[in-house]
């Protein structure tokens, strides 16, 4: 029997898991850097989770739509922001089958925090990138952020994050296994004595920097540039933890 994803079961705790409150200040700086660079009036946040990135864009005056395949995440995002008064909406959908009513609607599409690996296969990656291109207006830009798995050694345990709020805590760590990544998430509940824990293991295919760049070109993007950070201030190197690619829809 397939295990329920921690992201579905505990969507209401996703901000705890990802330490959203502590990350917000730095992420606001990243969002502002993207706005300064690309000057969008509209943005699609693909893989929006509980809505932080989309909300940060909206707070800067950019009309935002957040899209996620998880109904639990969309429900939580709407709970948080539906009464915010921001130019901000959320919708459920997959990257591989973007609704056609999103075609040519956005100056900027962002797909951040390694969300792109959720599509699973190279075929779905190509379908997703083609959908992102369709969603952009001519002259619009895609910003794609992913972990650089080529910088991780085989079977190396990579600590991701440990977070806690009140009596709930999360541990996350990853391991590289060939072309696949194994992400372990452990939820700890300190409200009981002794405390209890619940482990979740997620496995998915990795995409190398070369595969991502090639798929962008095949999808029709041009002027593809690689960076080592989301502020777009550092060039990408083989040792970079993240790869951030920007790509232009020229027509």
Image (cartoon, rainbow, N blue to C red):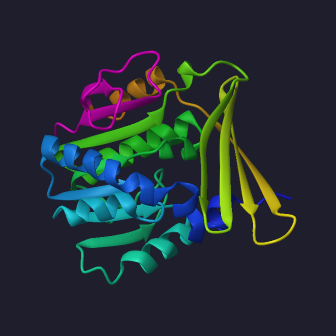
- Locate the N terminus by quadrant: bottom right
State the residue lying farthest toward the bottom: 83
State the residue lying farthest toward the top: 238
Q: Is 182 situated left or right of 42 in this image?
A: right
Residue 78 in picture, x, y percent from top left: 42, 77
Magenta-drawn stretch contains 229: yes
- Locate the C terminus by quadrant: top left
Residue 51 in picture, x, y percent from top left: 40, 64
Residue 18 in picture, x, y percent from top left: 53, 54
Residue 127 seen: yes
Q: Residue at x 53, y 30 (%)?
A: 207
Picture quadrant of residue 149:
top right
Residue 48 seen: no
Residue 66 lies, with reference to residue 246, above or below; the image says below
Q: Residue at x 31, y 40 (%)?
A: 143
Residue 189 in picture, x, y percent from top left: 75, 65
Q: Residue at x 29, y 53 (%)?
A: 28
Instruction: Work out whether residue 251 or residue 74 is closer to the camera in this orientation and state it.
Output: 74
Residue 176 lies, with reference to residue 77, above or below; the image says above
Q: Is 31 situated left or right of 53 in this image?
A: left
Instruction: Work out whether residue 231 or residue 194 is closer to the camera in this orientation and state it.
Output: 194
Magenta-drawn stretch contains 91: no
What range is drawn magenta here? Answer: 222-251
Q: Is 200 situated left or right of 32 in this image?
A: right
Picture quadrant of residue 169:
bottom right
Picture quadrant of residue 77:
bottom left
């Amino acid at each position: 029997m397939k295990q329920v994803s921690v992201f579905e079961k505990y969507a209401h705790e996703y901000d705890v898991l990802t330490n959203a409150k502590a990350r917000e200040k730095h992420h606001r700086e990243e969002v502002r850097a993207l706005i300064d660079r690309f000057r969008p009036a509209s943005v699609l946040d693909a893989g929006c989770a509980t809505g932080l990135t989309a909300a940060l864009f909206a707070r800067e005056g950019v009309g935002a739509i957040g899209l996620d395949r998880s109904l639990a995440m969309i429900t939580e995002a709407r709970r948080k922001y539906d009464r915010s008064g921001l130019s901000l909406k959320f919708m459920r959908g997959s990257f591989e089958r973007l609704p056609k009513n999103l075609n040519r609607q956005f100056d900027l599409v962002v797909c951040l925090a390694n969300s792109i690996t959720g599509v699973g296969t190279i075929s779905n990656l190509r379908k997703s990138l083609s959908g992102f291109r369709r969603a952009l207006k001519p002259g619009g830009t895609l910003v794609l952020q992913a972990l650089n798995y080529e910088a991780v050694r085989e079977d190396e345990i990579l600590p991701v994050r440990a977070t806690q709020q009140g009596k709930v805590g999360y541990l996350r760590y990853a391991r590289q296994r060939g072309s696949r990544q194994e992400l372990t998430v452990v939820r700890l509940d300190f409200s009981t004595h002794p405390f209890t824990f619940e482990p979740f293991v997620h496995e998915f295919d990795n995409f190398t920097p070369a595969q991502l760049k090639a798929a962008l070109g095949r999808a029709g993007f041009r002027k593809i540039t690689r960076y080592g950070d989301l502020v777009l201030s550092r060039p990408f190197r083989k040792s970079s933890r993240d790869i951030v690619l920007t790509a232009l829809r020229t027509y």
